[in-house]
Image: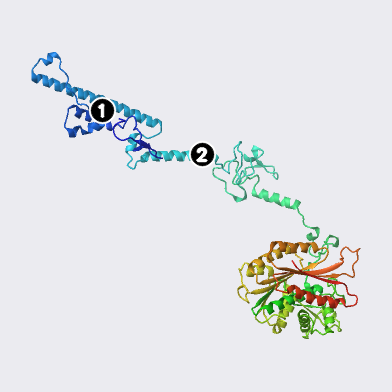
Amino acid sequence: FGSAGPAWRPTSDARSAPRWSLRGRSPPRFPSASAWPMAGAGLALGATQASSWVALPSAYLVPQALRQPLQPRRLPPQVASGSALTRRAAEAALTWVGAASVSVLTACVAAAASRRASASGRRRGVPCMAAKRKSSAGGMPANLVRKFDREKKQENQEKKAAFKMDKNRPPPAGASGTPTTGAWEGGRPDSENERAGEFKSPFTGQTYDRWAPLGLKQLSTDRQGGLGRARAYETPSQRQLRKALEEEEEDDTPEYKKYYPGTAPQELRPEAKREYRRFRHAEKAGGFRDVFNQLVVSTLVDLKIAKSESPVWYIEPMAGEGEYHVSRLQEVGRPIPELVRWPTVEDLYKVLSDQDLTYMPQEIRSWYEAVRDLNAKDFEVTGPEAKVVKQSQEIQWLPSTAFCAMKLLREQDPVTLYEEHDIAFSSLFNFVRNFSEELKPHLELAFDDGMIKLSRIFIDKLDHSKAHGKFTGQRGLIVIDSDFNRGGEVQRFSEIARKLHKHWRAATVMVTYPLKPATEVKFRNFIRAIREDNKGMDLISAELYVDNLRYREDDPDDHAWFGCGCLIMMPTHTTAERIRAAVGVFCQEMSKQPGAAEIRLKVEAL
């Protein structure tokens, strides 16, 4: 067999028995049973010395030893001595008998080999050759495929059943986990009686069968003492009684609330709580910090509009009230509060009123004109504050930073003012309505958080201005005048400054801050953090310090000096020189007054 024809090699298939291909290996030891009948037929035909076309199959299907032609046997002497006819008949009979015996022997050997191959295939779990012949596509028959699928499905179901847990049944004693929902989420009860339907009520002393609580329907397959989808140790009515008793025991209602309103004894009434009053800038407006901020803003606006005719978008996220009364919200007869530090707006205006302002810096002249125009109109002052103002005083209204800036801005410059406090916004709205005819720029007021709107419109570009339209990258000036009374404002302003430097390079940002010995380190760290986060940004800091003449060392709340400062990001050229000139004149004029404290100015590029 090994020398006849090409070599054969088995190929693997996931679902069928091995098939054979021409890859250079020997065939199996025993071929299929279908080849042996053909071999027998070839042997018979070869034995009879048939024609060449009949003997052709035997040349390939019969072993080499059987492909030799059959030779006539020699007759015994008693037969050989007979006639010629009788001798030829005997030789032909012997030939056919020999061929028949060889064919029978070959068929027996082939049947035994076929049975051995089938048994070996069954032992290995591989379908027999007959099963492979039934598959026209070369795979296993459909019945075997279905059988294997059923066995695999049953095996998967057995695996899943091993890990399945009924949440309404008690977990096995040796289970490592417990159901997270259902009747047994709390674990196994301490006593078997608690789940066997032997609940004894502490209220009536009788034993009851428990049912599903809270109106839940009991499962038809659940026989664990009336358990439903939750553990039921009491009926719904008993649960209500128990909760009512617990509430009475844990009642924390104050004694004065158990009386009819207004009839509780005085000793039971709590102390009256102090009403929270939102701080308003009007209580300390007009101090040296306001004067310093107004002069610096006037410098920035004048440099911006002198550089180009293109519009400058002026924005104040915390605009305030627009104008403030000199009474500073004080009651009748009370002096100016200590929060208003010298020198005030009134002091500077009084000094400048007696001098020729022709050779004064532009910032000083524009500030003086703003205060004069604010008090030029004869407004009727009503309320208790009107009695505080003396008739000898020259001014009654104090300007804001926004008003000083709008006096210098042009018609093409848009202005947006944000204020989130309702009282301050009402005052700002009333101020704009009174002075809108005298202000040149197009003004927009918004009752909203200015820092949030600043991020949405100019940084994230998720919104737009209702009065000025969509932001298109024009020049801008942003003034953030905050008292830093709320927590987290330092981090908030640092993040805003970093984003503005990235998304709006054409805008100059000014952030003001108060200074005193207790908070100096805080704002020094604030400036240092902005410098480290934005190493390529131009920064200028301007700070003003005023000594406290009424300082007492024994007072822990008092300080030896007070000050204010501003951090200017992305300033215009010559900003530092202009601030030194304008604020320097202010310090020089106020230092000439009798009893004046020392005033120091510090301007430096960071």
Above or below, 50 against 429 in this view is: above
Quadrant of the rendered structure where residue 360 is? bottom right
Marks 1/2: CA–CA distance: 57 Å
Q: Which residue is mark 1?
A: 64
Picture residue at 67% right of the left edge, 49% below the top: 239
Q: Which residue is mark 2?
A: 159
Between 423 and 257, the one lying in front of the other is 423
Local packing at callout 1 (Cα closer than 10 Å; few below 14, some 14-19, many 20+) is few
The mark lying in front, picked from 1 and 2, is: 1
* Quadrant the C terminus occupies: bottom right
Between 391 and 148, the one lying in front of the other is 391
CB within 8 Å, label 1 to label 2:
no
The kind of residue on which mark 2 rests is Lys
Above or below, 60 against 327 in this view is: above
Between 207 and 417, the one lying in front of the other is 417
Quadrant of the rendered structure where residue 204 is? top right
Give coordinates of residue 314: x percent, y percent.
68, 75
Task: Examine the rendering and report whether any part of residue 17 can be seen.
Answer: no
Between 223 and 80, the one lying in front of the other is 80
Q: Secondary structure at mark 2?
A: helix
Task: Give the mark, 1 or 2, whose residue is nearer the N terminus.
Answer: 1
The kind of residue on which mark 1 rests is Gln
In screen coordinates, is 16 left or right of 378? left
Give coordinates of residue 479: x percent, y percent.
71, 72
Quadrant of the rendered structure where residue 193 is? top right
Say which mark, if any, is on residue 2: none
